[in-house]
Image (spheres, rainbow, N blue to C red):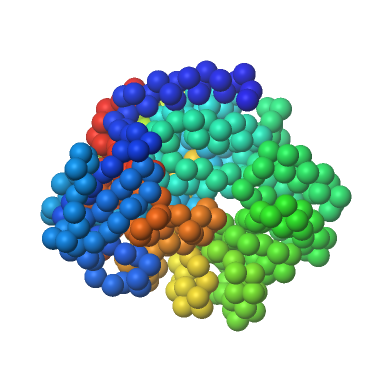
Amino acid sequence: MSWRILPLVAALLASSLIAGGASAADAVIAIVGGAVVHPERAGAPSDPDTTIIISGERIQSVGPAKSTKVPRGATVIDAKGKWVIPGLIDSHVHFFQSGNPYTRPDAVDATKVVPYAKEVERNKARLPTTFKLWLASGVTSVADVGGPFWNFEMRDASRQSPAAPRVAVAGPLVSMIDRPQLDLGDPPIIKITSPEAARELAKRELEHKPDFLKVWFIFRPGDNLAAQEAIVKATGDAAHAAGIRLAVHATELDVAKAALRAGADVLVHSVFDKPVDAEFLNLAKRNKAIYIPTLFVNDGYTLIRYNSWRPTESERRLADPQILEHMNDLEHARKDQLPAAMLTIIRQSVSFRPGVTTIAMDNIRPVWNAGIPVAMGTDAGNIGTLHGPSVFREMELMVESGLKISEVLASATVNGAKTMGMEKDLGSIERGKLADLVVLNADPLGKVDNLSRAHRVLKGGKVYDPAELMRSIK
């Protein structure tokens, strides 16, 4: 493990003492009297007055409270009048980014206000807090689909902290374009110009045992799509030979089809430019691909640029207070600190409806109806999309797109487990599965905001009080 992350591990272990986690390898916990929601049952009603028995990190039994005996000495969580769901899963995040206006200088250049090197060091040092934000939001697993090589150290740190979600991870993105603004010696995005170079980068990443290889498939007018597809295929072939999956950023229909032809297993964004067609759907089904809509992230950038970003109620409760403090910094930046074009945009101060592409929203239902797994993912860490409570913005937009709340919940549990590659262990409340659960104060099938009302969060049988997690954050 790198010297850069050793202090982080020590901080994580210390933070677990104040994070509200209660655990022992052989601990027995009984969640008594709650209504258990089963997202895998396609909108079936909750099972009322249910008891869940947890032994160690796994669910031992689930049954009616009247006939399910609570073992002697068990720790009891009274869930009467509450609802229990599987832990939420965000299938698209980036820990190398923070969500604040300084985290992507290739998109918003505010480096005269905060140098990018300072932002990166902040993100590394702040990982213990970022981990807690996910748990406090009821998110017990996340897929980080691309970042610098220190992403693998971040995964190690998450595994050594009980106050952290499960993390699946990819390393640097195989990219069709360069992003020198992000290169401090360990770039998150690496331009690749040939299949040979793609195989070489894949070899370097595979030494770290990633959960995915990732391609940033950016196609611009004049580019050779076939040549780019060959780079994607070389990366996918390397991933599949190693027994892992290929994730691809491909936001146009023709590019997404090329990605699927090249072997993509996960599409981390919607198709934004055209309605999906039969060819796309057939390719996705052939690959058994997962489709992650990622609807809000573009709005986050737009709202920050126009100085119109405001926290939601759940973000005021569950986001990193240090990040919230800086979300509107650009409004107050001096003329000499921002490019003139950025100042012009910020000063317009227009009022507008967030600009999610209608086509992207319209594409979700036909993808879902085709039987292609749709997984909830936020792209958290990008400017305006905060780690943790951004999941509630994303799920609201999925409902606006025409999915039922029960379907959205399935996308954030059952299908998220597929993204994590942990369908046998996560995504539903059943005997033998990992005890990653959320006890809610309100009915999650009533409205999306109720999903943010966590009374307790369990990850691997360890119990967290979201309020205590947030109070432990400085």
Foreground pick, 359 / 315: 315
Picture coordinates of residue 299, whole percent (x, y): 45, 51
Picture coordinates of residue 209, whole percent (x, y): 67, 42
Foreground pick, 51 / 208: 51
Foreground pick, 188 / 129: 129
Q: Which residue is drawn at 66% across and 34% down?
A: 149
Left or right of 227, for residue 146: left
Left or right of 302, for residue 209: right
**206 shown above or below 42:** above
Q: Which residue is drawn at 33% across and 53% down?
A: 60
Picture coordinates of residue 164, whole percent (x, y): 43, 36
Q: Which residue is drawn at 38% across and 67% down?
A: 40
Left or right of 242, for residue 436: left
In the image, farthest residue toward the front: 72
Task: Please identify the quadrant where the N terminus is shown.
Answer: top right
Picture coordinates of residue 233, whole percent (x, y): 77, 60
Question: Taking the image as drawn, is residue 404 in sight?
Answer: no
Left or right of 11, for residue 446: left
